[in-house]
Image (spheres, rainbow, N blue to C red):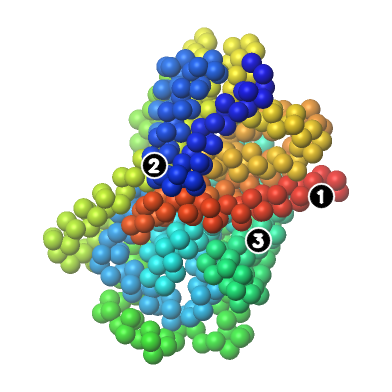
Amino acid sequence: MDLVVQFILAILPILLIFIGLVFLKQSGTLMGIVGWLSTVVLAILFFQTSPDIALYASWSGVLSSFGISLMVLFTILQVTMMDVTGAIARITAYIKSIAAERYEQIMILNVGFGSFLVSIGATPVTMLPPIMLALGFSPLAAVALPCLGYDPLTSFSLLAVPITIPASVFNFDPKLLGCTIALFLPVISTGIALGMLWVADGFEGVKKGFSTALVAGLTLGFSAIVFVNLLPGSAIGLVGVFSGLVTIAILFLLRAIRGKPIGTATPADTSATDTGMPLWRAAFPWIMLVTFAIIISIPVIQTGLYTFLGPIQKIPVVANKFVDLKLLNQAYFWVLVSTIIAAPLLVRSGKEAKHILTLWVKRAWSPTLAAMVFFAIAYVMDWSGQSVINGAVTFAPGANAFNMNVVIGLSLALAFGIAFPLFSPTLGLFGAFVSGSESSSNVMFYGILKKSTDVLNLNFIQVYAAHAVAGGIASGVAVAKIINAAAVVDKLGIEGEVVRKVAPVAIVLTILTGVMLVVMLVL
């Protein structure tokens, strides 16, 4: 089959999803299911994939999605409880008292606090939209901004899992990759901060908040460079944590330098602040979650938690393939625990508890299913062309030419030749858009990028770092994340509108990443 035809067929499911979302205005969950079905059919008919392998790949994708899909499920429970009980309103009133300007709220919450949350394993796309909506932002902005806020330090999210997982699988130095990724971040983080202002309030918003966005983006980016070089490789997971905290501190310092009081509510905010709920109680679920996230990041505790359940966590899929759930090490487990612990402090009656659970089910089923489906798509594409040989899922001789990801990567490499570095970050954008996860994108495209850089005699780590950065940028348009954010503010159906608004920011930043990569390779 002609490579051009193969390329068109390989990207067809993604085109269907994009068209359905952006032009036909269908829900992300529906288009995810359509995309999965089309991926399975195309893999079977045109990419030498047996029906069994396609279904096993889908099941492996569903199991592998738990780090995200169950995080979505339980975080929506937590946020719904906080919303119904008035905790979100109390936190919102406090935020208004310490950051009155919209651009300050955007930078403190989505750049600083959002980066911190992402790094410890929490999910700003679930936690922040209700607050943004309560602060007066439009539903589109309330959904889009936390998704963009996932972007700047995505590579260091979940204690740097997008870096450490491929480093462990493919045996390279995680610190080297982390240091190279960080070189992109001052520019990309600043671009994301400015993009947030544009998404929220257009060019007028960019004009008003330009200096604050510049400070936030540069602080976040340069902090990442400093910490990734200062900390030992074993502590790379703390880079995002410290960078986010430094950014928050600098933003408050900037506010003080400008003569703006911190912690003093305006008269208009006073009634909103006086809700009868202490701030510590309102924030208690998040305080517990942050505490647990920090504790489980300690290596000896990680090992102990994993050993406690042991091999029972390894779920066999087929042949040599299995998924290690690592249940007690996952942030979603501790989201559930922190929610249960906090419930007696927030929930006031059995009737309110029932309302919370009913609303939770209504909000959570769609984004949870979407996260699973998009992972299934990514895994079918990754396993396409493979078969079980001698007890292992692998490629028969010559069959890797029928792998959908290989076809896409090879087509781009041949099409652009020596200009491949300029366009290679689009693979990161593509991979994370499909799966909703930079980690999955980094693993899926490692082999393709390694082969391409060897053939073109390019520095692999630099190309791979640019790929990872673009995978982080994709968080702003990743359908699974957008559905998650939309669900917690009861705005499902807005996904296509969010993609249309945020896509220009993601595309410009991906192109900019390619330009920076070319400069790195030349120097």
Residue 185 lies left or right of residue 133; in this view the side is right
Q: Which residue is mark 1?
A: 519
Pointer 2 local density, CA inside 10 Å: few below 14, some 14–19, many at least 20: many
Q: Which residue is mark 3?
A: 191
Q: Quadrant of the N terminus?
A: top right
Look at label 2 and name its amino acid: Thr
Name the residue at 54% across, 37% down: 15
Residue 472 placed where, x, y %? 58, 49
Look at label 1 and name its amino acid: Val
Name the residue at 65% across, 61% down: 191
Dot in front, 1 or 2: 2
Residue 238 placed where, x, y %? 56, 55
Q: Which residue is mark 2?
A: 29
- Which of disc 2 and disc 1 is earlier in sequence? 2
Secondary structure under the numbered disc 2 in the rendered image: helix
Residue 502 lies left or right of residue 289; in this view the side is right
User: Is there CB contact under 8 Å for labels 1 and 2?
Assistant: no
The vertical placement of 9 against 137, above or below, is above
